[in-house]
Structure formats: structure tokens, C-alpha cells
Amino acid sequence: AEDPARDFAPSIGRLVLFCTPNETTQVRVDTGFGTGDSVSVHYDAMLAKLICHGPTREAALRTMQQSLSACFVAGVASNLDLLGRIVSHPDFNAGGIDTGFIAREAATLLAGQGTPSAEVLAIAALATLGAEARPPAGDGDPHSPWNERDLWWVNANARRTLEFSDGTETWPVAVARDGAQWRFQIDNDSILGMATPLPDGQMRVSLNGGWDGVLANIDHHVVTLRWQGVTWRLSLLDRLEAADEQEDAADRLVAPIPGQVTQVAVAAGDCVERGQVLVVLEAMKTVFRLTAPADKVISEVSCAAGEMVQEGQVLVSFKVVE
């Protein structure tokens, strides 16, 4: 449970869904975690060890690649994609690597995901529509027409737009019914798709007639997908909710993860500059220096050195400029 894109910072939180491959004579999984468990700030971030055996290194690596593709972590960031790139790298396949391997091959192994393809966005939309189609627990007959989310309108073809974001960019997906399937318009791409849900977050997806397997989970508007060895975490945007959160975030500094405050560098009334370190937080042997988002005046400091804080807890408040 660590994020290679953030210098391997530990990721803390609840495992909304945690899947590992079935054990065989060639595959062994050592883990103490399961779906619903929490990754705590007090322990190492190790979720599991995957051990694969084969008569040759090549056979063992093939087994490991297949086993990694069956793993899924939703709720916290993980290094699954990095592990997949490592075991697929020709230098690792050849053996004889050393401790400088990841640093030397960082451009390949630690490369960012980039922009999600139209296919990825269509899959995210299918996962969202599938979640909407499931009636809330205890909501009576699951086959009741009142629980349908198929956009049926009288004498009209209903359309809607789903917006997905990675926190930096936003991608709209226009959605409309097309017979028994959905048609997605993403920029200049038109994709006809449908999906069949399976247990443990698995989903069979058809995109323009071609079927493939996907691992997917939706929790609190966060869509986590694992497809073709790549994990995507996309937020389903609610414009009104996002506007409220952006307004609130401008006036406060919050803890990004649970941890212990080791230093508070400001006090109420101080004038601070953009980028100035305000609070230092330590979690799982990693130090986080939290800085001012802009030139601000401190209104209140709500934490103290030595205090344990939770993710999202307000640490510093800024004065509102009228």
C-alpha cells in the first residue's frame, strides 16, 4: 500500500476491495488483510507477498504476470502496476539485476499513467451505470421497474453526461441508450458497450463487440479500474459538490493521511507565503511537509506537535479575504 508516483509514500485507509489470486501448487499468497480491513499508520504498508514457482525462471515469471493481473486493490494506492512492469521488463526477465535497477529504469517503471483512453473512460462509465442499476439494500424487489436506471423516457431518447477526473484533468462521457447496449461519445470516439457483473469486483465488458475482463469498484464517487495491467482511479464529478469542496479547501489546510504531527511552524496571525512549510507530519516512516497553497494569513492552528491526526482533519485555517 504505497504510491510509486509519490516517491513510494505509504497509502493509508480502508481496503474497499482486496483480491488476490487463488492459490495453487505454483502460486502462494501470504497476507493478513482482506476486504474491509484498514491499513493503519502504525504498521508497515505491506499488504501481501506473492510467491510464484515454476520449472524455469521464464515459467515462473509467466505465472507471476498472470497472478498479478488477478490482484486488485481499491481504497488505497498500491504498487501493483509497478510490480507488473518489473516482471515484464526484459532486464528483469534475464536475471542478474541489482538494487539500482528501478532507478536506472525509472522512465519506464515509474512512468505516469497519462491520459485515460476512450476505452478506459467507457469502462468507467459502464461501471458507474452498473452500480446505479443495483437498487439500494433493503429497497424491495430488485426487479421492480422503479429501480431501473436505464434512462427510459416517454417518446424520447434520453442522454446524460458523466464527468470523470484524475484530480487535474476532467473528461466528459456522453451516455445514451442504444438498444440493449450503451453508446458513449468521448471526444471524436463513439463506443458501443455493455457489461456483465461478476463476483469480487470482476466485470465482463464488451466494447464495440470485443469482450474483455475488468476489475472494478466504486466507492464514494471514486471509480477504481484494473484493466490490461493498469490501475485507474477516477473521480465521478458532482459539479455542485465540487464547487463547495473547492471553496472550503481554499480556507484550510488538512491532513492528507493519518499520522503524527512532528512540527508546527506557524501561529495564529502569522503571514505566510505560497510554498512555506506550515506543518510537518510523519506517517509510517515517511515525512510530509505541508505547505501554504498561496500567500495567506493564519486564522487558527488546530494541531500541536506530538498529536495524532486523522486524514481530512483540519490542521490550519486561513483568514478569509472579503
Image: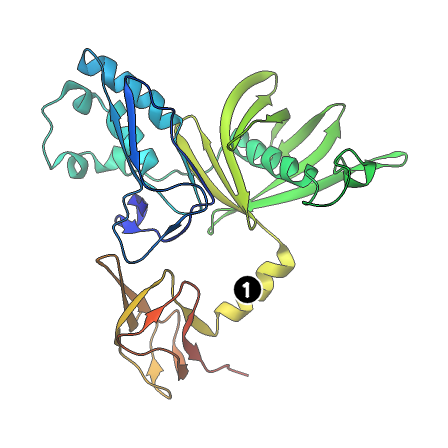
At label 1, which amino acid type do we have?
A: Glu
Residue 154 at x, y percent in the picture: 89, 36
Q: Residue furthest top?
A: 55
Would you call the spot at circle 1 few (<14 residues within 10 Å), some (14-19), or many (20 or more)? Answer: few
Give the residue displayed 37% in from the left and 45% down from the top: 77
Residue 274 at x, y percent in the picture: 35, 71
Residue topped by disc 1: 245
Front residue of 169 and 83? 83
Q: How is the image coloured?
A: rainbow
Mark 1 secondary-structure assignment: helix
Give the residue displayed 24% in from the left and 13% down from the top: 59
Give the residue displayed 74% in from the left and 23% down from the top: 180
Residue 65 visible: yes
Q: Determine which quarter of the picture holds residue 160.
A: top right
- Work out which quarter of the rendered image holds the C terminus and state it: bottom right
With 283 as the anchor, is 269 left or right in this view? Answer: right
- Work out which quarter of the rendered image holds the N terminus and state it: top left
Q: Determine which quarter of the picture holds residue 239.
A: bottom right
